[in-house]
């Protein structure tokens, strides 16, 4: 650990974490300045394959449901490739485990845009029944059946998975967990049990070799790559975007538990919420070794976003000092500054947030080095710096605090330029927590209602940046007939995405009311904060 002032150092930080005083500069050249020339013969059968976590799977507002609007699906549409295979999660509650947007709309239909205090009991009973129907569907109803599908999915992402999971975890592991842990129909606890395993089975149950042996996401990608010929690779573009869950647990639980013995053991490592850089590198090295064996023409490796900028962890009060990136505390988004009590509410300190960011900076240096080494070896690998992209969209960290903008801000182009169609929206979408009332959206728009995952237009931005890299790699894009080649720069149809993004085109009118109710419960009874502590 570097010698830094005690005012910015959390004493629990491991020695291999290099505390950064200045924020990491985004990488704007996906090639890292290293030219690579490859021979291209024919068009690979599988034009796009993705390995990752919730961001790649298309998670939104607490659930996986809009998989047809994930960034891989958006890219495939622009490619003119209608063969992308991905899992679906239709259910009475629209997704797994809990679609908060659908719930907000249903509450609005039942009680209107405001909930009268006299209606609280009715709302609570409605919520209990709503959750029970969703739980029964996934645990005992049609949703509990294993999907039957021909062909390995092209989108191999599973929410909640980390680097070790995509290397080693498969459908049979998840099936055995369900068999050994039959769900209980608990009247009070009505959340779907083992929801992650249920979601993963839908993604990976068809990912098996010729003997029926279950494959991990990386192994499944390799199997798709083997569908090529001696002259033509089986995959044209492979996107690997993983690592967020090696740190995300820290803000979900507001607890920093650094990885230790057993960090690579999937049966015990859930107790860790942030991977030490040395442990992340060991996992990444194994992943890179496996990806190098995959016959993909182009590989795009993504960096890990700074999870402390997502609006689920809201900075309390003013920054710790003028020009700083950090707030003194980070807590749940519905807890107002004047109500926050560190003796009652869950929180991270500014020092802990800096330590997490510093570890992620090291993760991203390792990922960048892996891409650099691959390009040096003549492999057509690219870096997608999604961490830098999101930093340039960070409202409260940078955009609303010009004094906090780093030295490199203008050098990389300043704030990320939103597409014209998004800039034309009122208000212009930003990275704050999504809120809407009777007159529509009042703030936010890039993150969905869980405060962690993008909205559909947010996924469109990710797709647009990946398309730029694919065009740089020489990937050809076609009209919807799959035959007529498109020329010039390819632009995502954001007007179409706005229309299908229900949070943007038809936001719930009761979110401000719901946030006030939830905040009031936490202020007076600490219910939600205690529930969070028990569930994680």
Image: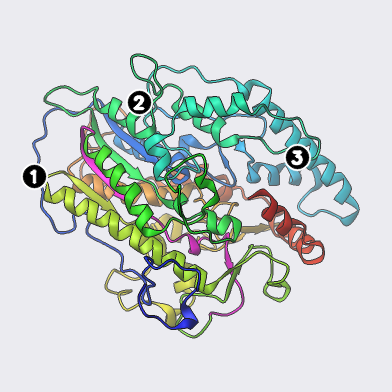
Query: Circle 1 — which element?
Result: loop
Q: Residue furthest right?
A: 118
* Dot 3: element: loop
Name the residue rendered at 19%, 54% in the picture.
Answer: 372
User: Mark 3 and mark 2: span between their CA atoms?
Assistant: 40 Å
Residue 189 bears which disc, if any?
3
Residue position for label 1 = 37
Residue 83 image label: 2
> Which residue in the rendered view is the most extreme toward the top?
211
The answer to whether the residues at label 3 and label 2 have Cβ atoms under 8 Å apart is no
Is label 2 in a helix, a strand or a loop?
A: loop
User: Which is more toward the observer, 104 or 429?
Assistant: 104
Which mark is in front, 3 or 2?
A: 3
Locate residue 153 relative to residue 62 in the image: left or right.
Answer: left
The disc at residue 286 is: none
Depth check: give the residue in front, 104 or 379.
379
First to last magenta residue range? 294-319
Residue 73 makes an appearance in the image: yes
From the viewer's perspective, is the residue at label 1 or at label 3 nearer? 3
Tell me the CA gap for discs 1 and 3.
Answer: 57 Å
Of the two numbered discs 2 and 1 on the same chain, state the one appearing first in sequence.
Answer: 1
Q: Position of residue 533 (x, y in %)?
A: 68, 55
């Amino acid at each position: 650990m570097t010698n830094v002032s005690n005012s910015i150092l959390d004493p629990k930080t491991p020695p291999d974490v290099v505390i950064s005083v200045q924020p990491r500069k985004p990488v704007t050249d996906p090639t890292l300045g290293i030219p690579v020339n490859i021979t291209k013969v024919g068009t690979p059968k599988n034009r796009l394959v993705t390995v990752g976590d919730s961001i790649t799977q298309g998670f939104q507002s607490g659930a996986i449901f809009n998989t047809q609007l994930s960034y891989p699906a958006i890219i495939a549409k622009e490619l003119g490739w209608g063969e992308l295979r991905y899992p679906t999660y239709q259910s009475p509650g629209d997704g797994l485990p809990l679609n908060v947007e659908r719930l907000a709309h249903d509450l609005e239909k039942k009680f209107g845009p405001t909930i009268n205090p006299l209606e609280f009991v009715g709302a609570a009973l409605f919520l209990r029944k709503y959750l029970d129907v969703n739980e029964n569907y996934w645990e005992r109803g049609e949703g509990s059946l294993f999907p039957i599908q021909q062909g390995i999915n092209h989108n191999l992402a599973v929410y909640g998975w980390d680097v070790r999971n995509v290397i080693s975890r498969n459908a049979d592991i998840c099936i055995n967990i369900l068999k050994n842990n039959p769900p209980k129909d608990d009247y009070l606890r009505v959340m779907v049990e083992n929801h992650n395993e249920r979601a993963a089975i839908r993604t990976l149950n068809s990912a098996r070799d010729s003997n029926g042996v279950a494959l991990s996401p990386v192994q499944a990608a390799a199997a798709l790559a083997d569908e090529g010929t001696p002259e033509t690779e089986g995959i044209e573009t492979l996107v690997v975007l993983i690592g967020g869950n090696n740190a995300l647990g820290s803000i979900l639980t507001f607890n920093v538990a650094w990885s230790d013995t057993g960090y690579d053991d999937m049966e015990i490592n859930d107790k860790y919420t942030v991977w030490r850089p040395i442990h992340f590198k060991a996992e990444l090295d194994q992943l890179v070794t496996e990806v190098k064996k995959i016959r993909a023409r182009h590989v795009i490796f993504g960096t890990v976003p700074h999870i402390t900028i997502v609006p689920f962890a809201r900075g309390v009060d003013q920054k710790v000092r003028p020009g700083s990136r950090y707030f003194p505390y980070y807590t749940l988004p519905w807890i107002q500054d004047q109500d926050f009590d560190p003796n009652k509410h869950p929180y991270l300190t500014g020092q802990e947030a800096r330590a997490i960011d510093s570890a992620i900076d090291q993760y991203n240096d390792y990922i960048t080095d892996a891409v650099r080494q691959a390009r040096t070896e003549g492999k057509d690998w690219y870096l997608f710096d999604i961490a830098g992209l999101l930093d340039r969209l960070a409202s409260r960290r940078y955009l609303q605090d010009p004094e906090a903008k780093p030295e490199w801000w203008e050098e990389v182009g300043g704030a990320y330029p939103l597409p014209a169609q998004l800039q034309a929206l009122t208000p212009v979408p930003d990275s704050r927590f999504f809120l809407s009332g009777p007159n529509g959206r009042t703030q936010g728009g890039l993150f969905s209602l869980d405060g962690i995952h993008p909205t559909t237009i947010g996924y469109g931005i990710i797709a647009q940046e990946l398309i730029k890299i694919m065009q740089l790699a020489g990937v050809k894009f076609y009209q919807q007939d799959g035959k007529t080649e498109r020329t010039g720069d390819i632009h995502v149809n954001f007007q179409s995405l706005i229309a299908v993004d229900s949070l943007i085109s038809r936001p719930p009118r009761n979110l401000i009311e719901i946030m006030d109710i939830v905040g009031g419960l936490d202020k007076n009874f600490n219910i939600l904060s205690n529930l969070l502590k028990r569930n994680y």
